[in-house]
Image: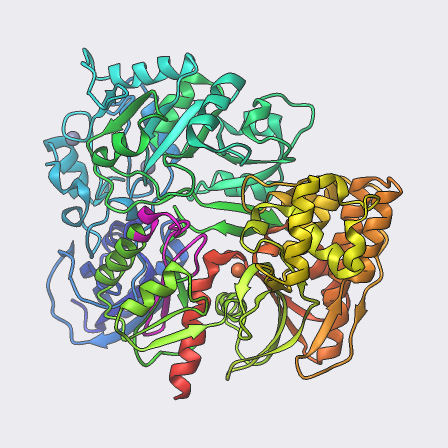
Amino acid sequence: MPASGKRYHIEVTGLVQGVGFRPFVHRLAARMGLSGWVRNSGNGVEIEVEGEAAQLARFIRALPQHKPPHAVIASLQPRLIPCDFTEGFVIRPSLASPGIHRHLPLDLATCDACRRELFDPGNRRYRYPFINCTDCGPRYSILTGLPYDRANTTMARFALCDQCAQEYHDPENRRFHAEPNACPYCGPVLQYCDQDGVIAAAATKDDALQQAINALRDGRIIAVKGLGGFHLLVDARDEEAVLRLRARKHRRRKPFAIMFPDLAQVAAACEISAGETNLLTSPQAPIVLLQRRKENQAVCAAVAPNQSTLGVMLPYTPLHHLLLDALAFPLVATSGNLSDEPLCKDEAEMVAMLSGIADAYLTHNRPIANRIDDSVLFVSNSKPVMLRTARGYAPLHIELNDVISRPLIATGGQLKNTVALAAGRSLLISPHIGDLSAVAAVRAQHEMAETLCSLYAIQPEAVACDLHPDYQSTRTAEKLALPLVKVQHHEAHARSCMAEHGLRGKALAIIWDGTGYGTDNTIWGGEFLKIDSRGFQRAAHFLPFPLPGGEQTIREPRRAALGVCYTIDGDGCFADSHVIAGNFSTVELEILRQMLASRTNCPITSSVGRLFDAVASLTGLCQVSDFEGEAAMALQHAAAAATVDNTVYPFAISPLDKSGLVVDWRPMLRQVIDAVANNEPTDRIAASFHATLAQMAVAVARRTGEKVVILGGGCFQNRLLLEQTSKALQMAEFEVYSPQRLPANDGGLAAGQIMAAIQTIQGE
Ligand code: ZN
Ligand code: ZN
Ligand code: FE
């Protein structure tokens, strides 16, 4: 060791486990002739490195410069320590220590190198459905504990064969410490089961796969165990087969996601930008919403009835590659569950959950430890926007501005539920769980909370939840026997967006969504909130209107239209000549009239989501919806098809009173009703409605005196509304922030609840 020798202890945090970081460090140190060791720690990776000073400086610079492609370094802290003069550089066993500063390793799509081997007849893993390496393969979905080591995954039950072990221990091999490393001799195998779950006899290793391929070719519905759960697969070109799946899944019109064999077929079916291509082919390989090409018939109409977009993904596991390569046509790939229930994840649940839906099963003996759905995104202004945070993205980690004083948990909303945890400087958001109206989803939510608390070794000391007394998530929070912070729904939406952009200080939050419980016990949903570090003030809201039939209105846009027309015309809306008359039977109208007159079962709301419903109904696009958001999507797609410049409809903003400004939409809706009566084209009415909403946002923002504007709430899943409102506000010189990594919908609530609870608790 030269006299100028030094030794550093280097702590690296971020996404540095399960991405080939230790082998990279080993190779780098060995090449530079440095000695020491590297290991996974609770916080990331720890390195001790010794050698000549200039060489050490080069080593430290090279760490971030040449890191493996999927590694994300959050911090890198070298500190001088005494030399210990040992020779060589080694990878030490991982250290188990608690702490939340670590990123869980996330599931990654099959890399190019593995895909080449998969289809190389000379390779020993030729056609092996579980091929992976340090750059790809299952991670979170097979994780049973931390640190990320084979012993803490569901691969622990498979002993490595000699050849696999050699790869695993060779720092020069690309499978060095690839924790799920496996091959046909030592790893998991496929099984094909009939509809009762009985395993079919297999003559050769490829038999199970071949049987599934044959069945799919025949138009049958096959449940296939993927990374984080079962998919239901069926030929996307086969109208009869897709309708059969719809009937069995009780899903009438909600669009199905499609897995295409390759990018060329995607490009033939949909318009696809560079940003969308990058997202589709990224290691996260999510579902991306793409604009369909009208003339293309690559998938049958039943896949996504009346939709101008298609949810598209590419094969992301070796098994998907094998299936799609053989079939060479697109498949419907929808979650293996009944509508809105959690994904089925193991063989025990398989037959119980999917019998009656699947004709057969293609499964395997590598257990799924943590269920995880496919993520869903779209691209807006070349940036990805999250709709469902799941595989490849979640658990999602956000660094907080400050260290928080005690660990917290938040239980989220009722629909699109997620949970969130916070400790130290970390905020963690769980993968998408689902709609808590299903008992199984409530169970899945409890499981998720327990798993995350145990993986991160967090003991929450307080809990945050929604203000709504009837949300399952609120009940769960109340049962925890911890100090409870209830957070108003739209404040949570606002703080979720602020958290991901690291915003603090004052802002105007424009939160438009379907429903959320307000502090005055009415249903809010068209909100302009002034937010600061202490809380929020309702600066403005949309003029409230009645929803005849309450909850039922959500499924029946025509009822929202009636509530709106009643607000404008009073009893006049029951006239035979009124535009809504044709949407109800005489008996229905009489019942609704009495309901409205006596104000029974007519909650009032300021919801923009319900205004979308009303306009979709008035324009004849949707009277009774099949799934949440159907009416709003129909209106968005109509507006997107408009070719002429849209007129902005009139509206009014009432003077300030104690409850803030009121945005009076009646002049706008009056115009909508007249336009419908005059048979104006629906696309123009829809486009004007969008344009007017954007101008309403600007008009209110101007009166509040805030500079920073935050957008949030489910309405902003609508790409057109999001883009138009952002643009209008930016042109009026506001600084605009909208949700990107966290969904604008209720999937973002848990994160926002935590942020609000932090304010409350730190303020005490
Ligand atoms: Zn690979
Ligand atoms: Zn092996
Ligand atoms: Fe919401």
Q: Quadrant of the C terminus?
A: bottom left
- Residue at image x 40%, y 17%? 220
The location of residue 15, given as percent across then percent down, is 34, 57
Closer to the camera, 20 or 155? 155
**Is residue 275 shown left or right of residue 473?**
right
Residue 643 image-quadrant placement = top right
The location of residue 628, given as percent across then percent down, is 54, 46
Q: Quadrant of the N terminus?
A: bottom left
- Residue at image x 63%, y 68%? 527
Name the image colouring.
rainbow
- Residue at image x 32%, y 25%? 118
| Magenta highlight: main SS | loop
First to last magenta residue range: 413-442
Queried whether the magenta region covers residue 435, the answer comes back as yes
**Is residue 183 shown left or right of residue 383?**
left
The location of residue 348, given as percent across then percent down, is 20, 35
For residue 406, above or below residue 302: below
Closer to the camera, 362 or 391? 362
- For residue 428, say whether it is visible: no
The location of residue 172, given as percent across then percent down, is 23, 42
For residue 261, above or below residue 704: above
For residue 462, above or below residue 583: below
- Residue at image x 26%, y 33%? 352
Closer to the camera, 515 or 539? 515
- For residue 680, say whether it is visible: yes
